[in-house]
Image: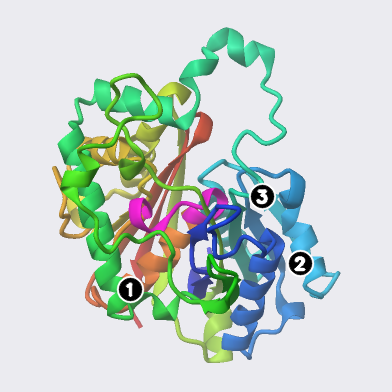
Amino acid sequence: MKECVIIDGIRSANARAHKDKGWFRNVRPEELLIKVYEALFERNPKVKPEDIDAVFCGTANQSGMQNDIARSAWLAGGFPEAVATNGVGQQCCSGMAATEHAARAIMCDEGDIYIASGVEDMQKVPMMFSLDMPPRLLDRYKMEDLPMGATAEKVAERWKVERVDMENMAFWSNKKAAEARDAGKFAKEIIPIEGEKEDGTKFMVDRDQWIRDNVSMEQMATMKSPFKENGIVTAAVSSPLTAGAAAMLLMSRDKADELGLDYHLKYVHGAMAGCDPTMMGIGPIAAAKKLLERTGKTVKDIDVWELNEAFGSQSLAVVRDLGIAENAPFDNLNVWGGALALGHPLGESGLRIIVTLNNIMKTDYKDAKYGVAMLCGGFGNANASLWEKVEK
């Protein structure tokens, strides 16, 4: 099979999904995607829009403004009608699934140049928007057990994750994200897009809005759970509602060499897994184990990990069960912070963590050979993908 390499990966900043305070509150989700696509072509002038074999775009809630956003954004951006698009839905894993579909198409020689993308605006298309739950699903599971917060509380109880450990994780997620931002680590992946401050002043948004510079363990300890009476999962240890978009340019290694393009990582393998939807956050345990078993790798073989921090409880359950770490700060996982600080635009996150992984392995971990990105998804979805440094 052919090899699939990452040529480039970029994203918008992640902004609050809030009608009054969100920096992208007046920017539609397809516009975020269009800006990301335009920047991708500007940064890679040897690749033209008409050269793309297809665009795979992940979105969790494909309704309202996000109804078939894969196609509508491409056409709204003025890009070629002849280029096919494919919307991918796997809840929070959608962006990663889009990436895997593109990578597999390249490896199977169905094409040489693909775009994988992901987008979500959780203000304009909120969770549960236009949802009509199947009655037979509710015969199998209780409705009150399916919302994300309820699943996080259940995981905390079953995996015996203590509140102080979750708050410690949130502290370090914000601290590392702030340090990475201040050191310019995200500059290679975030493309500036015009937004608005709370007072309506327009400005170029080039940083993630959710990072808390003055995160306080003492303040977190006073917060109450909105999900369960006397619960321990608070807003501080939950990924916040966010808007954002990301995209990657993926190419066969042969084509990249022909065009004289640079690359650092190649796709090795992806593994999807399912789990009990009332404990959806533990899904990456099964996905990562399947990924490692299929590729003959162990946890110790992986140099860098990116785990989407949906909740502190599920993140700690995952890293402990896999034997990656016990508590934050982590040595080789989410080294630039995670979703507790950066935000979690559902359909974007699975692709965003791969973009960040690629940049981490190109800069801070240049000698790292293997990296894994993984995340959970609503209704018991999970996904993990393995990436390898290319030896030239």
Residue tagged by mark 3? 124
| Tag 3: amino acid | Lys
Residue tagged by mark 2? 74
Residue tagged by mark 1? 181
Give the mark toward the camera: 2 or 3: 3
292 or 354: which is nearer to us? 354
Identify whether 170 is placed above or below 103.
above
Residue 335 occupies quadrant: bottom left
The residue located at (55%, 79%) in the rendering is 203
| Tag 2: amino acid | Trp
Q: Secondary structure at mark 3?
A: loop
Identify whether 349 is placed above or below 207.
above
| Tag 1: amino acid | Arg
Specify which label sits upstream in the sequence, 2 or 3.
Answer: 2
| Residue 361 in view of the camera | no
Mark 3 to mark 1: distance in Å?
A: 27 Å
Circles 2 and 3, Cβ within 8 Å, touching? The answer is: no
The residue located at (38%, 34%) in the rendering is 281
Q: Which residues are magenta?
A: 339-349
Q: Was residue 116 drawn as part of the magenta stretch in this picture?
A: no
| Mark 3 Cα shell of 10 Å, populated few (<14), some (14-19), many (≥20) | many
